Amino acid sequence: MQVDLDHLPRHIAIIMDGNGRWAKRRGLPRTAGHAAGAETFRTIATYCQKIGLEYLTVYAFSTENWKRPLEEVSAIIGLLKKYLLESIEKMEKDKIRLHFFGDLDALPPELRELTVRTDDISTRYEGMQVNVCFNYGGRDEIVRAARAFAEECAAGKRRPEELSEELFSGYLYSAGVPDPDLVIRPSGEIRISNFLLWQSAYAEYYYTDVLWPDFSKEELHRAIAAYQGRSRRFGGV
């Protein structure tokens, strides 16, 4: 398994899936799986920075995940708060930028304030950017972008004929961020689950049966090696 660290994908996106099944196999509550998954995220994000990746986007909580048991949702939000508090201390030291994709209005005020603080810190650095998709859905993102453009047209700020793919991208949560080159889906599921629907139009996908809490640096290498062995033609020959 050879990985050329001089020719990494610019942007890797990961659907962090399998936490609940990981816990169930060990006779643990699902909340324990999310805690283990959070530690894996920390390990992988740190390693991605070390090898020189520019952008890492992770799917942490979807717009559909509110349907889960209250205890599980509360545990995930608690982990987010813990991670944000730790990140605020580490971001300035490690020069990591942290940004959120999603509708954060549903978060408790304290958490929304923490996300604003991380955004502010991120403007000061040029290091790797980690995007956390929280209360995020790809279709919801596209609808919100379409609505924002329509509102500007209604206000006379834009004209419908101005709309292009490039202009529309500027209305998305990911405005200014290059599209993902590689999307990784652990846990054995083979679907995109409403993740970065617009942005991943020409992404390469890598699927693995490894559950997210067991995802390692070596598994990341396998995904990158698979990506580097493919020919990306973007519709050409």
Image: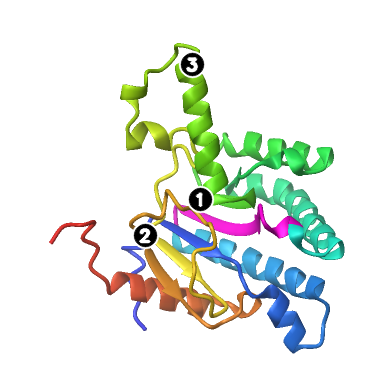
Q: Nearer the viewer, residue 182 or 190?
A: 190
Mark 1 or mark 2, earlier in chain: 1
| Vertical placement of residue 134 versus 231, above or below | above
Q: Residue at x 78, y 49 (%)?
A: 85
Between the C-alphas of marks 1 and 2, the distance is 19 Å
Magenta run includes residue 6: no
- In which quadrant of the rendered view does residue 105 lie? top right
Image quadrant containing the C terminus: bottom left
Mark 2: which secondary structure? loop
Q: Amino acid at mark 2?
A: Ala
| Vertical placement of residue 26 versus 100, above or below | below
Q: Residue at x 60, y 52 (%)?
A: 133
Mark 3: which secondary structure? helix
Residues in magenta? 53-66
182 relative to 24 in the view: left or right = left
Q: Amino acid at mark 1?
A: Met
Q: Residue at x 63, y 65 (%)?
A: 41
The label on residue 203 is 2
Q: Count neighbours of disc 1 (C-alpha within 10 A) and say few if under 14, some if 14 to 19, many if 20 or more.
A: many
The label on residue 106 is none
Q: Nearer the viewer, residue 155 or 136?
A: 155
| Vertical placement of residue 6 versus 221, above or below | above
Relative image position of residue 28 (x, y in whole percent): 82, 82
The label on residue 128 is 1
Q: Nearer the viewer, residue 35 or 19?
A: 19
| Vertical placement of residue 172 versus 199, above or below | above
Relative image position of residue 137 (x, y in whole percent): 58, 51
- In the orientation shown, which residue stands out farthest toward the top? 156
